[in-house]
Image: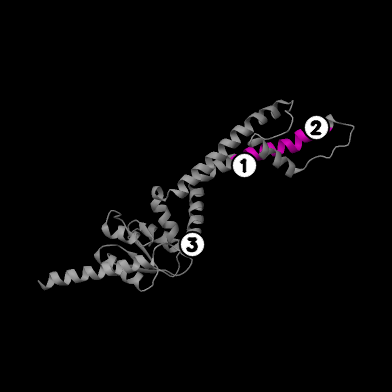
Amino acid sequence: MARKASATRVFSNSEIRIERLRARRRSYPAWRLARANWLDVVTLMRSGGWIPLVALLIVVLSSTLYLLLVYFPAECIAIAPAPCDLPGIFEALYETLQLIVFQSGLDFPSDFLGRLLFFLVPLLGLFFLLQSLVDLARQLFNKGARREEWQVSLASTYSDHIIVCGLGRVGYRVTLQLLDAGYDVVAIDINWQSHFVKAVLGLNTPLIHGDARDPEVLRKLVLSAPALSWLLSTTIP
């Protein structure tokens, strides 16, 4: 009977602590979210999101060089001997951007390369532009589809924090006590279906999916922190 009463009392204390933490930790600070989003963009670029942007850059560069080195000089020759002020690279770049959005006022070129570029630049340029923007926006704003990567980006914004390895009953209570005491905490657990994991995520605390015994997981966490991290194991002897 005493054990039952004690268990009920501990559970009630935990619930009280959780409600207090929820009131204090309704959301991440704006600066932390901004920094985490920037780190998330960098992660997306490294994972292949740069490919459409590089393709777009190649299209823009090809068109700009053609206009600068071939098209504009040919236009000046066509109006000779009248004086001609040869446009520079910024004018060529501007006309390329106009060409991509189908707003160019340039005359259609007579050479094969120019005609090919005038057809392909709007189609390929707009395609790569939209693809890069849509893919980036979809992955950046749909955090639920990239939950693990987003949690890593959030954890990377912390410094001088405590890393709790394992969110069993002990790790969960330790995490609540640390948060309640005002410490910054990042947790690691391999079972994201656990009730404790969901509760910690609900307190806006970064949680890394992985085995705390995996050196790669710990290395990634420690190296991502710009300052000292304290490692606290609740599951490893």
- Residue depicted at 54% across the width and 45% down the height: 50
Vertical arrangement, residue 225 with respect to residue 127, above or below = below
In this picture, which residue range is highlighted in magenta? 56-76
Residue 47, how many percent across, how many down?
48, 47
For mark 3, what is the residue? 30
Residue type (three-letter) at the residue carrying disc 1: Leu
Q: Is mark 3 on a helix, strand or loop?
A: helix
Nearer the camera: disc 2 or disc 1:
2
For mark 1, what is the residue? 57
Judge from the rendering whether residue 205 lies leftward or rightward of residue 115; answer left or right.
left
Residue type (three-letter) at the residue carrying disc 3: Ala
For mark 2, what is the residue? 75
- Going from N to C along the chain, the mark reached first, 1 or 3, is 3
Vertical arrangement, residue 94 with respect to residue 174, above or below = above
Q: In which quarter of the image is residue 14?
A: bottom left
Is 58 or 128 nearer to us in this picture? 128
- Going from N to C along the chain, the mark reached first, 2 or 1, is 1
Residue 230, how many percent across, how many down?
39, 70
Asked whether the viewer can see residue 98, the reply is: yes
CA distance separating discs 2 and 3: 53 Å
Q: Is mark 1 on a helix, strand or loop?
A: helix
Quadrant placement of the C terminus = bottom left
- Residue depicted at 34% across the width and 67% down the height: 21
Tell whether label 3 touches label 1 (CB within 8 Å): no
